[in-house]
Amino acid sequence: MLSNKISELTDFLAGNDPQQSDSIGDPTTITDSDLFERIFDQTILERFEREDVLDMYYIWNIFGKGLRAARFGYMSTSKMYFDRGKQMLQDKTAEGTPIYDFINMYALPNHAYYLYKTKEYQQANNLLDQLLETLERYEEDIPILHMGKIQQFHNFSRMHFKRGNHDAGMKTVSDLLSYMMAYQQPDFEGAWSTAHLDRTPALLKFDMVHQIFSEMVHSILLYFLDTEEDAFYKSFDGLLKLEERPKRDGALNKHFWNWLEAKKSFFEGRLSEGVEQTLNYLRTSGQEYNYFQLSLLRSAFKSAKEQAQEKTPALIDGIVHYGTEKMFLPPEIVGKVVDTKLTSEIIKTFRAPLC
């Protein structure tokens, strides 16, 4: 019965659940965001002479400074660094050589980010296209570069969203996740083979899936709550059409699949089942899945509200407390989930009954 499930969930959020754990996450699914760079750095050291490696790192450092300046909005400073980096690339290397290509594997996406920030989208796309051609020349020999190619298509999806092409952005996300999680051939330009996935370290694949999947869940919470169901089915279309979970990488990807199944329960009107799945998800997933958890709490809140459940006010209190105190998420996004504009003073009124 829905009311009983809502009561169980509310008790959990208030800290009154005997199965609640203080664990910070599932050790089988902790991300390692530096793994790609460590493998890539080792590849560089094995393939190039010491003098070339020093030149590469020096030029990369200049492009890195340009990227950091762009991220903080110092666009004139960023441009200065990118101009300097491009000049050094011309002075120190020759186009078409391996050292030129490997420097560009780092330099091109950084420069594309600058162009993305200055809204020069076509130029940014052109650089990413150039990068994809470079990566494809080497990915057969260096399997991790296939993740670099996937990263660039994720960047394409980001640019679709930035330009308001939401359907195209969601389609790209859906195709990427279907390729990586279900080994379905994507409808992208270039050479694509699931054999590259088999040759990639499992944790590196998981990090990429986590990046793409969690960013989409976060984006739906921020920008598409009014059309959440439509965004959900468009963004995860390929995965949702599968009759059963793929067995490959099943342990690593379990929290993505569990989230999909719980959200689907809510959208198909199986509300009690959805709330029960939400409770199980909160009990078993860690902090690296905070936005997945908040997304499920949004569905539980909507279900309680639409069914005029008497426990709805207590559930709102619980979500605000759990989202701000346990997940340490920004009050603004937690407030969006419960249709309430939160301030620090308002949050204090939610905390009192739960302490």
Image: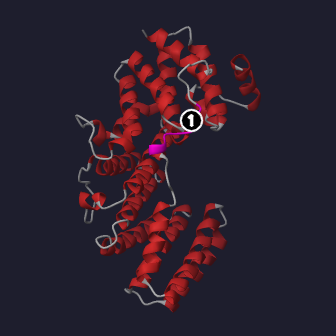
Q: Amino acid under label 1?
A: Ser
- Residue displayed at 49% across by 67% down: 38
Let me know if residue 184 is in the magenta part: no
- Residue displayed at 64% across by 38% down: 330
- Residue 53, given in percent of the width and then of the height, sits at 51, 83
Give the residue at mark 1.
Answer: 23
- Residue 209, given in percent of the width and then of the height, sits at 40, 50
Compared across the picture, whether 119 is left or right of 2 comes to right
Q: Is residue 189 above or below residue 320?
A: below
Name the magenta segment's main secondary structure: loop
- Residue displayed at 38% across by 33% down: 258
- Residue displayed at 51% across by 90% down: 92
Quadrant occupied by the C terminus: top right
- Residue 346, given in percent of the width and then of the height, sits at 73, 25
Quadrant occupied by the N terminus: top left
Q: Is residue 25 above or below residue 83?
A: above
Compared across the picture, whether 139 is left or right of 51 comes to left
Quadrant of res 95: bottom left
Quadrant of res 157: bottom left
Let me know if residue 25 is in the magenta part: yes
**In terms of depth relative to the viewer, which is nearer, 86 or 55?**
55
Q: Is residue 98 above or below residue 68?
A: below
Q: Secondary structure at mark 1?
A: loop
Compared across the picture, whether 196 is left or right of 68 comes to left
**In terms of depth relative to the viewer, which is nearer, 160 or 335?**
335
Mark 1 surroundings within 10 Å by alpha-carbon count, few (fewer than 14), some (14 through 19), many (20 or more): few
| Magenta-tinted stretch | 22-28
Q: Is residue 184 visible?
A: yes
Q: Is residue 295 above or below residue 92?
A: above
How is colour applied across the structure in the image?
A: secondary structure
